[in-house]
Image: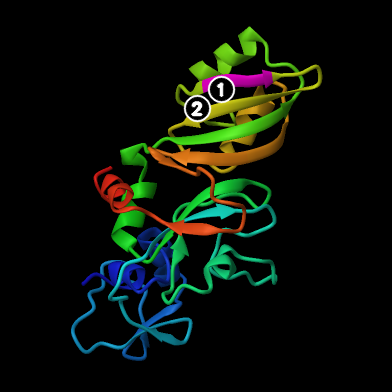
Amino acid sequence: MRLNKYIADSGIASRRKADDLIANGNVKINGRTVTEMGCQVEDGDVVEVNGSVIRPEEEKVYLLLNKPLGYITSVSDDRGRAVVTELVSDINARVFPVGRLDYNTSGLLIMTNDGELAYRVTHPKHELTKTYRARVSGVLSVKKLAKLRKGVDIGGYVTKPARVEVVMQGERSAVVEITIHEGKNRQVRKMFAAVGNNVQELERIKIGRIMLGHTKPGHYRKLTKEEIEYLRGC
C-alpha cells in the first residue's frame, strides 16, 4: 500500500495532508525517516507519524459536523486553539476534517477516517459544489450580482461562474446564498470584497447534495448510507 494511503486509512489525515507529513520528515517506516511520496508499506512494517505508531482503521466512520465559530479545522494546533476533533471526541475512531472551514466560518464540515473518500471530495477535478449563506454589508445591486455570477478577480485568480441569490436585502446589509465550485482560501469573503461588500457572517449549508439541515452548532450526525454512496460516486 502507498504510504500516503496507509496514513489516510489510519485516520491521521487526508492523502494530500499525508503527503505534507511525509515531505516534512514526520513519518518513519521501521524507524527510518522517509520522504519519498511513492514509498510502499509492506505487511509487517511499523509506521510512525510524529513518533506515534499508526495502523489503518478497520471500521470507516463518516460524520457531518456543524462547526461553530472559533474552531480550527485541524486535528491539532500548536498554538493551543480549539480544534474540530474535540467536538467528536466521543467517537471511537480517529477522524479528520475533509477540506477546511475558516476559524470565523461556521457550518457543514465532513469528518471521516476514509482517506479515499476524502480525496474524492476535495480533489478539484470533481468540482463538488459548496453552498454558503452569508450576511454582507451594504446593498447588492443587480450589477454586483452579475459580476459575482460571472466570476470576479480575487487576486490573481478569476472565480468560475457561481449561483448567487439574495435571500433578504436590508438598508445596511443583505443575506445571500452563494454556490461555488472551487475551494480557494477565503474565496467567498474575497468574492464579496471584490464587489465592495464585506462578509459579516458566513455559514456553509451544503456540500453537493449533502445538507446541513437541523444539526445544531457543535453537534454532529452520522452520514446516511445514501449520502456516503453519493460522495463515493462524485
Quarter holding the N terminus? Answer: bottom left
The residue under the point 62% across, 25% down is 176
Up/down of 68 relative to 137, above or below: below
Find out whether residue 103 is within the magenta segment: no
Find out whether residue 167 is within the magenta segment: yes
Magenta segment: 164-168
Residue 111 point in image, percent of width and height: 44, 59
* Residue closest to the eye, 22 or 108: 108
> Residue 152, labelled with which disc?
1
Name the residue tied to disc 2: 159
Look at label 1 and name its amino acid: Val
**Residue 133, located in which quarter of the rendered image?**
top right
Q: Residue furthest front?
A: 214
Residue 182 point in image, percent of width and height: 45, 36
Look at label 2 and name its amino acid: Thr
Is residue 183 visible in the rendered image? The answer is no
Q: Is residue 103 left or right of residue 146?
A: right
The residue under the point 68% across, 28% down is 193
Up/down of 140 relative to 16, above or below: above
Q: Residue furthest right?
A: 172
Q: Which of marks 1 and 2 precedes in the sequence? A: 1
Is residue 149 visible in the rendered image? The answer is yes
The residue under the point 35% across, 62% down is 15
Up/down of 115 relative to 108, above or below: below
Q: Secondary structure at mark 1?
A: loop
Residue 112 point in image, percent of width and height: 40, 62
Q: Specify the principal SS of the magenta part.
A: strand
Q: Residue furthest left?
A: 43
